[in-house]
Image (cartoon, rainbow, N blue to C red):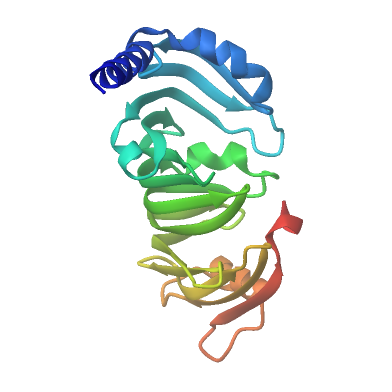
Amino acid sequence: MRIVWLCLLGAISYLVSMLVLFPAAPVVDRIRPHLGLVALDGVSGKLYSGVVSSVRSTDDLLPLELQNVAWTVSPGSLLQGGAGARISFDGYGGGGSGLVSRQWNGEVVVSDFKFTAEAKALEPLLPVPIASFAGELSGTIDQIVLANNLLQRLGGQLTWSNAALERPVPTALGTVQVLIEPEADLSHVVNLSAEGGDVTMNGTVTVRQNGDFAADVLLSPAPGASPEVVNGLRQMGRPDAQGRVRLQRQGNVNRLM
């Protein structure tokens, strides 16, 4: 029995040494052909802890790019039924950090994720440059669960401070709040609100796992809103006696991409 424990200890010591001492670059080079539309540049560090200077998507529809993407293996993930690492990154005028793990059942879980960004810096991600924005974004993702590349669960919140639409119609939006809550049937409810600007907003968007969505949002012009803002709301729908416009839409998210 003692020999078995010694062999087990030796195997564990070897694995730990591989993580701590083995360079990450050769491993990344081996898996690079399997990364699909993801390009990694400037890999340094060890398997246990390292940095990629640039991670970018080569997909023209979503040209996402992050800098200084760092990881540190999280031993605590083993106690939660998986293997994971704590990551951090810079990009789009801000950055973020969180824990990413792969469970033994194949699920990918992202938790304790926090991020910041500048709204202006995100404009290149728009499929068509039809608008320009200003303001600061900050958010917290409590948990994301993916199984078989399908979203199972997403919960978190996003705050857009000093929110503004610069074009086509300059509109101050004040503070925009987005709260995402998962439902029991694998659908999600997105609660929207905005106050302190030219337009107030309240409403919800329900999104199902297959991409079907139903939106019900009420937009109200502030007393001091400019005629251009009021006219812009009227073009979005028929206003009531107070000038409020109720948007009710149904469709599929995948068909909008």
Q: Say if 89 sits above or below 232 in the image.
A: above
- Nearest the viewer among 117 and 43 is 43
Residue 110 percent coordinates (x, y):
43, 45
Residue 42 percent coordinates (x, y):
50, 11
Point out the residue furthest to the right here.
255
Q: Residue at x 43, y 75 (%)?
A: 222
Q: Residue at x 67, y 62 (%)?
A: 211
**Left or right side of 231 for 254:** right
Q: Residue at x 44, y 59 (%)?
A: 172
Residue 85 percent coordinates (x, y):
38, 31
Q: On the rendered image, what quadrant is the N terminus found in? A: top left
Q: Quadrant of residue 2?
A: top left
Q: Say if 18 sits above or below 243 in the image.
A: above
Point out the residue furthest to the front here.
1
**Left or right side of 148 for 177:** left
Q: Residue at x 61, y 84 (%)?
A: 239
